[in-house]
Amino acid sequence: MASKLLLSQLRNITRPTHHRLINPNFIFPLKNQTLIHSRPYSDAPQPPPVGSKPPPTNADSAPTHKKISSSLNQAELAKFSAIAETWWDAEGPFKPLHVMNPTRLAFIRSTLCRHFGKDPYSAKPFEGLKFVDVGCGGGILSEPLARMGATVTGIDAVEKNINIARLHADLDPGTSSIEYLCTTAETLVEEQRKFDAVLALEVIEHVAEPAEFCKSLSALTVSGGANVISTINRSMRAYATAIVVAEYLLHWLPKGTHEWSSFLTPEELVLILQRASISVQEMAGFVYNPLTGKWSLSDDISVNFIAYGTKNIE
Amino acid sequence: MNRAIVRRITPNIRTWRSTLKTFCSDTSEKLHGSDGDKAVTVKSSSLDSTDNVPQYDVAIVGGGMVGMALACSLASMPLTKHLNVAIIDSNPALLARDNIKKEDAPDPRVSTVTPATISFFKGMGAWQYVQLHRHAFFDRMQVWDYTGLGYTRYSARDVDKAVLGCVVENKVLQRSLLSCMEDSDVKKKIYPSRLNSMTLHKSSLLSGTDSISSEPSGSLAKLNLSDGDCLYAKLVVGADGSKSHVRKLAGISTTGWKYPQNAIICTVEHTEDNRCAWQRFLRTGPIALLPMGDNYSNIVWTMGPQQAADRRSMNEADFLKAVNDALDDGHGPHPQSERIGDGGILAWLRSDETSSASEHFEVPPRITKLASDRMVFPLSLMHANNYVSKRVVLIGDAAHTVHPLAGQGVNLGFGDANSLSRVIAEGVAVGSDIGEMALLKRYESERKAANIAMMAILDGFQKAYSIDFGPLNVLRAAAFHGVNYISPLKKNIISYASGEQRLPLFT
């Protein structure tokens, strides 16, 4: 079904008059991008189209905190509910992320407890710390961090994700204090916001300019703060597992979720972080055991890896 | 296909919102049109609790031994100490403050706790309370049957331990766990009523809109109690016994069958000190004599329902005679204390022999007095097909019941409580919602395999000993001898029954 859609979109490009059966909005992603970069089935934030202007920053777009829950009426909530369930559907297209989540949280918990000198046996070790989850999606990472006591701000460039995240976070009083913003890291930098820890998990491979992105992440971190970045290695093994097996054979991820060419090797990541005044302290890999169906932390960084770094003290 | 629908609806949502703006004239809740370029902040108002329904993290339905063990275990771990726990049980003993006196006659309802359970209690800091009351360690065990063809003796020294187990009254265990919890500063509340009904809201974004907006805690479980109270909980633990109401409300089906046997339990007195556990398999079922200390012992005698009713109603003298017959040489001869043979082809077997293999057959102590009422219980095997459901988890007898022939029933329940509290701690450590299925499924996969293995073995024993057939009797006798003299097998059995091993394999 997905391939039929792609074929019909291709046909629409060549024959623009014959799109009566397909909503014109479908070919929107292809207008400004060449086909090779199009990822119509990806829910991840799309890189800005080549050659387009950066989003206009005028006074109107300064984000103000709005109460949204009481102005949405019941019918609209129902519409959101109908379409937004897949983020939090643990068996849906985001299943690998849900299964991997406890493992990466274990790494985050141990490194950040050590960094901030907090008691690792406390139930809420991050009390009083400000975290930002860049590219938060539906809030899969933000919610556990909030339950661990942190004051979390989740940002994502796709507004649909922010709405889903808001709806879900409001269900649990422990997570309803998360601040979700539909914005980019660059905009937050312009607002001069600072955080004790900046986390960008599985985001940097979807960004057009990783080096600039890392500079923004660094600008968001207070001096001496922590950064956690996770991504996929640009290795042959990663191509075989994360793209061929995960997308085409096992259908864990929708096809086109990842581009092998935008993966970063650990060395490149360390280098661009260094240039952004972040020194990487620890790195770990995630390994999947197909027999038990569990992810675990390991030294093997050839496919998925996560890096913890500290912002140099200025 | 989903994405086709998504793309189709999204532009419609945008038009919806712009029409909404005209309706909602409240200026404080304006919504920007969403183009992804402009920053739209979505922050909900702080949740004011419109209803004063108390919210708990864990609601344990059933304040018996296993439910209290879970509560106590959560109270003893630093990661879970802060959780709000509600215990729902209408048993007045939970709120009573009177202590168990030493002069009380021993209650016939006792449990044999294995060394694994003892270390679980010690880890929680509850064993010190058990030690204040009557409890009896035993380090020897003898098992034989009515045919007199073989016997097995076990000793704690075979596995280099001091005890094989400890026999404690159920009320002592329950009271010790309660005292341990009260001494810790965990936030708990005991609700002295029964659970009436439970509403489990479906997965957040799939449910209808009214449940999201009308209740801020839309994804919690709501429990309605029989005295009109209600409360919310993130996780509901069903620890309410084999006829579990929580299990029925959660719609979890069970597999199992009734055994054609009932068990009589009572406490008896004898003249000599007893530090050995005795079990003799008769034609109708096993009789077990478990030491309780102070010359008391507990009898668990399994037999057919009619015979159980008869034995319960017969007078004390006749009953004691029946018991002594059952333990001694009524129903069949004593086994001979033979050795396999000194020297010969089997001499190599004895190089690694356990000390108990050289012990002779002993006759159990003579029972002189009945010290309590006789109680009769029906026996059955039951296993819940799932231990978990959305926000509900079953532990203890609510999840499984077994035949008492090996004293494992409540120990399996304590194993469940131990495992669940560890899984909850791991969940809290990584900030997960403790009621989510992925976490609960981890508990299920840990315990299901272990419980099913133990249940299968116990059921096998029950079936094997209920047939009186010549060749099968000889086979059972051979099994007795085999276990007695083959030391790796004996050591494996002891450590499996002591709970040190999760599965009965040679690991």
Image: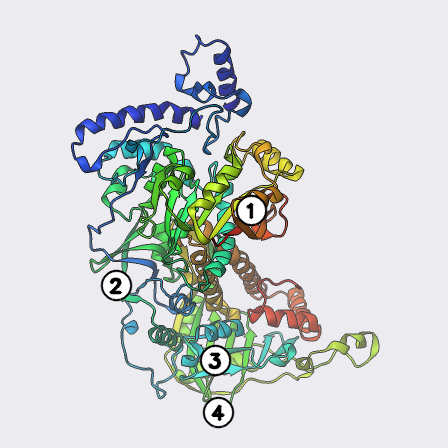
Across and down, in percent, residue A132 comes to 41, 47
In the image, what residue occupies the spot 64% across and 62% down? B505
In primary-sequence order, the first of circles 4 and 2 is 2
- Residue receiving disc 4: B271
On whether disc 4 and disc 2 are found on a single subunit, the reply is: yes
In the image, what residue occupies the spot 27% across and 71% down? B92
Q: How is this picture coloured?
A: rainbow
Across and down, in percent, residue B111 comes to 45, 74
In 3D space, how far apart are the residues under numbered discs 3 and 2 (Cα atoms)? 42 Å
In 3D space, how far apart are the residues under numbered discs 1 and 2 (Cα atoms)? 62 Å
On whether disc 3 and disc 1 are found on a single subunit, the reply is: no
In 3D space, how far apart are the residues under numbered discs 4 and 3 (Cα atoms)? 18 Å
Extreme residue toward the front, this view: A314
Using a 10 Å C-alpha cutoff, classify the residue at mark 3 as few (fewer than 14 neighbours), some (14 to 19) or many (20 or more).
Answer: some
Which SS class for mark 4?
loop
- Residue receiving disc 1: A274
In 3D space, how far apart are the residues under numbered discs 3 and 1 (Cα atoms)? 86 Å
Name the residue type under label 1. Gln
Check residue B322 in the rendering and tell me which mark sits there, or answer none.
3
Which SS class for mark 3?
helix
Q: Closer to the observer: label 1 or label 4?
A: 1
- Residue receiving disc 2: B193
